[in-house]
Image: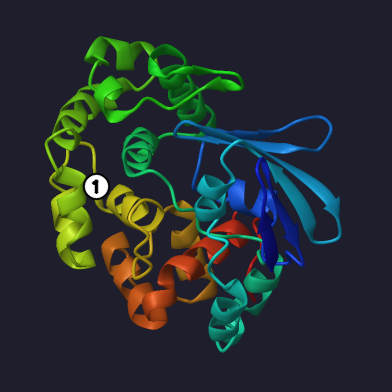
Amino acid sequence: MIYEIEKDKIKLYEADTFTPEGVLTSGQVFRFGQEKNGIWWVNSAQEHAEIEKKGENSYIIHTTNPNFFANYFDFQTNYDIILTRLKKYEILHSALEYGKGVRLLRQPLAEVIVNFIISANNNIPRIRNSVTKIAQNFGKKMEWGYAFPELKDLSKITEKDFQSFGCGYRSPYLVETIAKLNEPNFLQNLSLLPTAQLRKELLKLKGVGQKVADCILLFGFNRYDVFPVDTWIDKVYHEDFNGQETKRTKIADWFVETFGMDSGYCQQYLFYYKRKKINLK
């Protein structure tokens, strides 16, 4: 992949390891969409980008903050190297080819934590609706819509507010966890911890179970030695890898033992592929 950063855009060439659909519909984010003209858009923190396809494996990303989105889409990482490492596992070949345009995003931590607490035992339309209402009611009004609230503004949201946004039983958890996130240097101190210890600390937060903690580790802290297990990955494990474990924590451990520091990447390729209800074999 070749990318060029300009004042108000990023130009991508030979971008066979990036597609907006692969990146944005792989379960990492909830504030995105596609217009009738085919242009994809995504909002993160205070920023907005529109992705226009210009030709075979070439795109222009229109944004007022190209440096933010060059980091957000992780363009500095060579995914060809990652794919080469994973291709030694024959069972992954179909998923890797199908999901070659998937990339792991580098997202603002507080946004990831709030979003994935909301995601617990929830469905995509409801999650998207809740996150949109949070932004509309407590985020800064921008030319393109509403920014996601900063931490200090998130702390202004009451349990009643969260209930009205459709967050349900998660509402008190969000209030308590956001208060914790606002403690001085809380997130900075967490980021210094090794993965296993960091997971233990995340599990102390209200509304954070194992799967949510692993999603936060992968999508927020960019720890790639984790393997979030949801319904789709559970299916992959039992249907395609003939696994015998029933506890999802054990399934996650098995995948990490198998794929090591590439586990997070592998999880995304498998998740994206399996959601299309395709068997690996």
Q: Is residue 80 above or below residue 37?
A: below
Q: Is residue 149 above or below residue 25?
A: above
Tell whether 189 sits left or right of 60.
left
Q: Residue at x 39, y 37 (%)?
A: 119
Which quadrant of the structure image shows residue 8?
Answer: top right
Residue 269, percent from left and from top? 57, 65
Residue 120, percent from left and from top? 35, 38
Looking at the figure, which quarter contains the C terminus? bottom right
Which quadrant of the structure image shows residue 45?
Answer: top left
Q: How is the image coloured?
A: rainbow
Three-letter amino acid code at the position of disc 1: Gly
Report the residue marked by disc 1. 209
Q: Is residue 68 visible?
A: yes
Residue most toward the front?
7
- Mark 1: which secondary structure? loop
Tell whether 186 sits left or right of 277.
left
Residue 64, percent from left and from top? 60, 36
Observer-nearest of 245 and 185: 185
